[in-house]
């Protein structure tokens, strides 16, 4: 009876979770069907490219008799990336989906709530994992002419990989939440730690990649040389337990493969179970309690002009939010470090392949890419505020002052990114002073244009987060559009600058890019400010 | 102070007017109530007055300033307390009120004095330097009220201001509303609490399906007594969810609703006559009885919560 009730509760919760996640999917209109068809087409195209590329890579490994190394490397890489990405999804699903307070009131066990939430997230992760691994494993079997046993073992390999990926995500998600609840309201500390972590991780990654590239080039060895391959081959055995899972699929080294491939996922899941049983409810309740708690800060009743007051309010709203502070401020603050290492790597590779003349163009492209990614945050201008936006809207402050305050905040951040990033590229010796100035002007113009465009996109159709006090933790379509346009410009501009520098010379190519950036800035600013009043006035609460 | 002239508002993708040809004029020093069922158009009208919603036709003037053509001056004359107590929750109470004071050009000394005064009046001094995120429903409402009053607006608009508040907080807010009017300012508020509206307001407007039914002068004692009956009579048609039904069921329901409305109106007239004929001491008791009967007849309408003044009531 008890089990039956539990099963019903889990079933109902799963349906609830699925409904809330896929509420936006509608196939009862022409637009909805078109959207779905477009999505399917895009997936088919991506799939085609993915399989074609995978096939050619497997072939190159196969030619050198290193095909099993490919399988080990690839499955490990996918597993690692998905486990890492899964932590954030699990945290969002378990603690920030906004329904915990509601669900806790129902007569359902906490384990049921956990199971329902994890089940839905688990199904989604499983679908992704199958979609990525299955075609690759099939192509691998086809290219390397595997026997029937390999094909029989594919589902086993996928299930074991999935158990590891999902188990590891849960394993890290719960301690992560615990740490998060501990550092709540310690805004400066959180910002500094996030910034340093991002910068250090990125720097270590880039240095490692560059060292590998330099090693391969200076030693004049190919990736498939026996020396390199041998080292990677030995190292790949330590990619527990993914390496052993692939060995199990190929029925190799079974004495070690079976206990590791089966034992490690089992141990991870057991630890997950014990940890969830002991800590999930505690952390969930603590989080619920902490979400509603607040800090005390004594301030003076200082008078500020409209502009300053709006600027301060906007900054505090971002700074005092863990999500916004991380995705905008911490990323922006670490951008100069990321720019330096990316430029160093790009110049090192580019100079040895095409020539030193493209170094400035590479530097510009790297900065443009970072600006495009970070400035897309401006596409949350109005959406981010939710219902409180209307309290500013009804104030006796002209709409253009309200927008200008927001624009200024974004420009302070993006301007700082551009200036500091350009400075590190110049001081790092990658460009001369003239190129530095051109780089600075081009990237600033691009930042202004991108900011204007992102603001207008959000003003035209704001996407308010649903629910009281909710933040935009999931991707907003406005941010996505802004990001795509920004990246297209950054990549297009960058590729032109590289190719143009090589063919016509750096001065000409960068001059043209500067002109295009100016035009982009002008057009975006015009688009943003013409009709701004109308777009602003039109924003009203949905009924 | 507030002049709404032939206001029409239709929502995007809707064929029906949410507010149609609404005309209301509110005088300085007046406390004006705005009654209507859920979805009658009260909040829509208020959002048009505050400039949150654009509207299709008509004019709205606040202290002589047109909300469309002279919006900044119109907004300067007005303070608004929303029904959803939306505030910047990451700020502290003091930071939020100071931010609003900045937007309304309140100088340093004045704001300092008012913040302390209001915080004390609304018993919020202890939480003023705390982040709003941790406030309770009532505290959020109070901080919204302090922010709305920080610039001493000539017109104070409140959208269902007393919903979910404890009696002490309700009393604090009512006292402030009265005080505001006493100073020659105007209070315009929407509510579902008919008793409270009858006790507090100088005049009241009843709105149904976006259209004005009647503006009732509550200085006339009889109007006060019959406000609830009138409200129920005007809104009786809404008791049956005619729109949810189809075909013969809809027709039958509509007929029934019309009958009920007519009956209620007829009874009102009869009651008024009976009252006029009855001796003075019986009148009070009869009024009470009539109200109970009337409420029972309209038993599909949830009874409005009773209001009890703890002190200073009219």
Image (spheres, coloured by chain):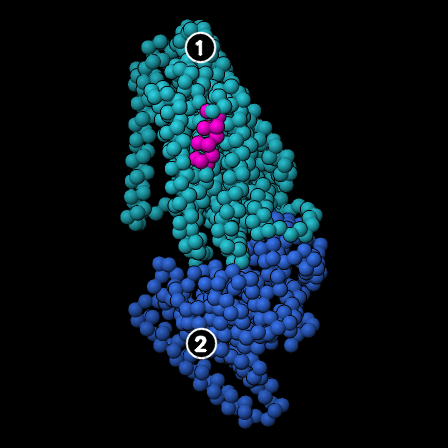
**Whether residue A107 can be seen here:** no
Residues indicated by labels 1 and 2 sit on the same polypeptide chain = no
Above or below, A327 relative to B95: above
Task: Please name the residue shown 64% across and 47% down the image.
Answer: A293
Residue B286 counted in the magenta span: no
Q: Is residue A489 left or right of residue A185?
A: left
Task: Please name the residue shown 45% across and 67% down the image.
Answer: B41
Task: Please name the residue shown 30% across and 39% down the image.
Answer: A38
Image quadrant containing the N terminus of chain B: bottom right
Tint applied to chain A in the drawing: cyan
Task: Judge by depth and name the residue closer to the eye, B189 or A141.
Answer: B189
Magenta stretch mostly in which secondary structure? Answer: helix
Task: Please name the residue shown 58% across and 32% down the image.
Answer: A194
Residue A528 x %, y %? 41, 46
> Which residue has dot 2 on it?
B213
> Which residue has dot 1 on it?
A216
Residue B100 x %, y %? 59, 55
For the record, the magenta segment spans A435-447
Query: How many C-alpha atoms fall within 10 Å of the one at disc 2: few (<14), some, or many (≥20)?
Result: some
Above or below, B68 relative to A238: below
Tint applied to chain B in the drawing: blue
């Amino acid at each position: 009876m008890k089990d039956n009730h539990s099963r019903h509760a889990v079933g109902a919760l799963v349906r609830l979770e699925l409904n809330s996640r896929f509420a936006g999917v509608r196939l009862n209109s022409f637009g909805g069907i078109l959207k779905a068809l477009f999505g399917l087409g895009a997936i088919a195209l991506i799939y085609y490219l993915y399989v074609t590329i995978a096939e050619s890579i497997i072939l190159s490994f196969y030619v050198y008799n290193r095909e099993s190394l490919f399988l080990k490397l690839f499955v490990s890489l996918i597993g690692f990336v998905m486990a890492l990405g899964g932590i954030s999804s699990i945290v969002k699903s378990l603690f920030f989906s906004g329904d915990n307070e509601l669900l806790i009131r129902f007569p359902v066990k906490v384990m049921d709530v956990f199971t329902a939430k994890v089940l839905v997230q688990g199904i989604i992760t499983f679908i992704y994992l199958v979609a990525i691994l299955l075609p690759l494993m099939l192509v691998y079997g086809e290219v390397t002419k595997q026997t029937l046993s390999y094909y029989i073992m594919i589902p086993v390999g996928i299930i074991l990989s999935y158990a590891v990926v999902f188990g590891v995500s849960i394993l890290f998600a719960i301690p992560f939440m615990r740490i998060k609840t501990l550092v709540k309201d310690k805004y400066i500390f959180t910002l500094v730690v996030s910034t340093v972590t991002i910068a250090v991780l990125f720097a270590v990654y880039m240095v490692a990649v560059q060292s590998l590239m330099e090693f391969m080039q200076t030693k004049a060895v190919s990736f498939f040389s026996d020396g390199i391959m041998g080292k990677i081959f030995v190292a790949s055995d330590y990619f527990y337990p993914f390496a052993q899972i692939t060995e199990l699929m190929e029925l190799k080294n079974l004495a070690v493969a079976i206990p590791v491939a089966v034992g490690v996922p089992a141990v991870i899941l057991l630890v997950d179970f014990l940890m969830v049983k002991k800590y999930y409810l505690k952390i969930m309740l603590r989080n619920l309690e902490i979400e509603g708690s607040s800090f005390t800060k004594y301030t003076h009743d200082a008078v500020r002009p409209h502009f300053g007051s709006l600027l301060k309010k906007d900054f505090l709203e971002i700074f005092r939010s863990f999500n916004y502070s991380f995705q905008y401020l911490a990323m922006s603050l670490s951008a100069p470090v990321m720019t330096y290492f990316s430029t160093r790597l790009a110049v090192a590779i580019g100079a040895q392949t095409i020539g030193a003349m493209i170094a400035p163009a590479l530097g510009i492209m790297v900065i443009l890419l970072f600006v495009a990614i970070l400035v897309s945050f401006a596409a949350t201008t109005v959406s981010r505020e939710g219902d409180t936006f209307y309290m500013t809207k009804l104030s006796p402050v002209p709409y253009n002052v309200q927008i200008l305050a927001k624009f200024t905040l974004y420009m302070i951040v993006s301007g700082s990114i551009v200036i500091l990033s350009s400075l590190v590229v110049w001081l790092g010796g990658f460009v001369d002073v003239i190129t530095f100035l051109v780089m600075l002007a081009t990237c600033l113009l691009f930042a202004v244009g991108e900011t204007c465009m992102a603001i207008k996109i959000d003003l035209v159709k704001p996407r308010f987060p649903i629910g009281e006090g909710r933040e935009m933790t999931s991707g907003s379509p406005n941010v996505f559009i802004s990001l795509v346009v920004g990246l297209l410009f950054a990549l297009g501009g960058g590729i032109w600058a590289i190719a143009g520098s090589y063919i016509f010379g750096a001065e000409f190519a960068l001059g043209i890019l500067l002109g295009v950036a100016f035009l982009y800035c002008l057009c975006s600013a015009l688009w943003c400010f013409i009709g701004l009043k109308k777009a602003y006035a039109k924003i009203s609460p949905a009924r | 102070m507030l002049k709404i002239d032939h206001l029409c508002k239709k929502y995007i993708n809707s064929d029906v007017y949410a507010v149609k040809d609404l005309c209301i004029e509110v005088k300085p020093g007046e406390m004006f109530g705005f009654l209507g069922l859920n979805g009658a158009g009260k909040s829509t009208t208020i959002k048009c007055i505050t400039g949150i919603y654009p509207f299709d036709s008509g004019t709205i003037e606040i202290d002589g300033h047109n909300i469309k053509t002279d919006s900044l001056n119109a907004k300067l004359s007005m303070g608004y307390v929303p029904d959803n107590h939306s505030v910047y929750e990451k700020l502290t109470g003091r930071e939020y009120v100071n931010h609003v004071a900045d937007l309304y050009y309140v100088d340093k000394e004045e704001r300092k004095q008012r913040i302390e005064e209001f915080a004390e009046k609304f018993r919020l001094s202890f939480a003023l330097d705390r982040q709003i995120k941790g406030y309770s429903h009532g505290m959020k409402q109070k901080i919204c009220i302090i922010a709305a009053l920080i610039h001493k607006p000539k017109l104070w608009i409140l959208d269902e201001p007393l919903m979910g508040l404890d009696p002490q907080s309700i009393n604090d807010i009512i006292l402030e509303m009265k005080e505001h009017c006493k100073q020659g300012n105007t209070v315009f508020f929407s509510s579902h609490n008919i008793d409270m509206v009858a006790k507090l307001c100088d005049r009241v407007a009843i709105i149904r399906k976006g259209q004005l039914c009647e503006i009732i002068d509550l200085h006339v004692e009889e109007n006060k007594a019959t406000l609830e009956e009138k409200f129920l009579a005007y809104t009786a048609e809404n008791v049956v969810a005619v729109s949810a039904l189809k075909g013969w069921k809809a027709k039958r329901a509509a007929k029934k609703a019309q009958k009920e409305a007519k009956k209620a109106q007829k009874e009102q007239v009869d009651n008024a006559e009976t009252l006029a004929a009855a001796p003075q001491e019986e009148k009070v008791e009869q009024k009470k009885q009539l109200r109970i009967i009337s409420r029972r007849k309209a038993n599909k309408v949830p009874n409005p919560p009773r209001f009890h003044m703890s002190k200073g009531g009219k």
